[in-house]
Image: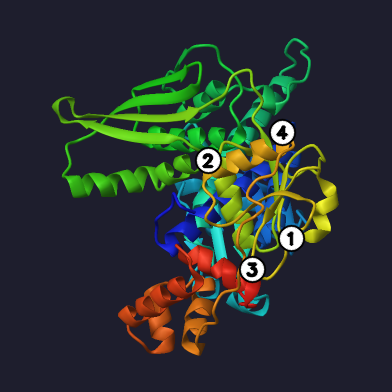
Amino acid sequence: MKTYHKDFQAMLNETRLVWDLQRANQIAQSFSNSLDLEVIAHLATAGLVQYFDCAFARVWLIEPDRKQLRLVASSGLYTQINGSFSRIPMGEFKIGKIAQNRVSLLSNNLAEESWVRYPEWAIENEIRSFAGYPLANSGQVIGVLAAFGYEPMSSEFLEVLSSFCTTLTVALSLALLHQQERQTSQAAKPQAILSEFSLSDSLAYILGQTSITVLGTERSVNLSQTQVFLKLAEGLKALDCTYCRLTYDLDSVSLEAIAAIHPLTNQAQDEWERSIFGNLSAIASCFDGVFRINTEASIKAIQISLTFPTSVGLPQPSLRIQCRLPLLQIGFTQLAYAAGFRVQAEEERPVPLLTDQASLLATSDYIIWVSHPSKKTPSEAKAQVNLSTTPSELQAAVEAVMRGDTWELDQNTQGRPKLSQREQEVMTLLAKGLRDREIADQLYISDSTVKFHINNILAKLESKTRMQALYTLMRADGLEL
């Protein structure tokens, strides 16, 4: 895509992150209308298994006496909640220690961990990875989420899981509060649903004693942006934030905060920001947001802000995307968000469909075809796009087909020259996600030779980016991931 001039691996990591965030959003939406603790926990674990291929996932909640944790949901390989780990004393086993110490634990070599009681179980069941996160709210742990995987967990997935735990904690906290209110027999009220709680309410649960000032009329914020706001609140909580303001302007919503900090060097400042906020800036930018940190050395404080654009009164245009290859699905999903579209999964004929699958042509009245050299553009297509399409061009394509016009249907789709055996080997490894250094090691060549081959490939395929070249090969030359 013309606006992205980044290393392919960095681009791939970002698109994977966006795609994973969207799947986490789908899980969160599944329990957004419930205030039942067990239902929320079960939907969370089932979603992790379904969307992220976890071997199994579990949620324990701390009992009121805070002496033990109770298993309330288990999905995947194990579904029983009354087995040997249904009750775990606080501070015992790894789950109990995570709850007691509020320390996250990540491992991609589970069988080798000293704390695993039965390493032969992990080996026999091919369980390689584990992630355990404390579900903490306002300084108090309410439970633990654990996910087990057959494959190593990527850094992008761990970032998504951390953010997801924030959303899950807020949902469980609100459900717990609702349960307590019912148990104390307060005045009868119509049962609320989680989606009725405002962004400021959710932020207040995380920030605890820090007061929040709300300016403007509070309105609904989409779930992706809400998750990023909640992730920021986690960092602010760790900083002991002294000031927080949530502002609703006509075309944006922003969260601003001030916290004390000791002066740091530029390098130390960067390391400190990453340790507190991770890659929050990259996540925010994926959803068209801006995250800023300004240091005021004179008063030993930092100013933090997160802003998202919003549209008032006008519905966000929708686009359905269904591509055969996951790489394309991720790439065009990111492009759609950058163009300001809401990507929906539901099949609706009036909603434009961006696809490369002929079997789906009858499911929409507005087909935007993903062009490639090996196939002719179908007659049902009203527009066609490719991996060089920019966000503004995608907007123009959608607007054209909705008006009844066509867009870019006369693009040249001439065949591409074939690659040498070595060039094919390089691209095959690149498609598997390997970096230049790793490709060089596998092929016993130098980094510079890898770059030389890649430059030749881009020239032969008339591609501007590695991602565009990969797409061409996967569709035309049968390159397999």
Picture residue at 74% right of the left edge, 56% below the top: 75
Q: Is residue 299 visible?
A: yes
Q: Amino acid at mark 2?
A: Ser
Q: Nearer the viewer, mark 3 or mark 2?
A: 3
Q: Residues within 10 Å of mark 4 (few under 14, many from 20)?
A: few
Q: Secondary structure at mark 3?
A: loop
State how far apart marks 1 and 4 are (Cα). Answer: 46 Å
- Most extreme residue toward the right is 362
Q: Which residue is mark 1?
A: 76
Q: Nearer the viewer, mark 1 or mark 3?
A: 3
Q: Earlier in the sequence, mark 2 or mark 1?
A: 1
Query: What label does residue 373 carry, if any?
Result: 3
Q: Earlier in the sequence, mark 3 or mark 2?
A: 3
On the image, the x and y values in percent for residue 464 come to: 45, 62
Q: Quadrant of residue 32?
A: top right
Q: Residues within 10 Å of mark 3 (few under 14, many from 20)?
A: some
Task: Say if 222 sits above or below 50 in the image.
Answer: above
On the image, the x and y values in percent for residue 338 come to: 53, 41
Q: Which residue is mark 2?
A: 392
The residue closer to the viewer here, 67 or 393, is: 393
On the image, the x and y values in percent for residue 409 come to: 67, 52
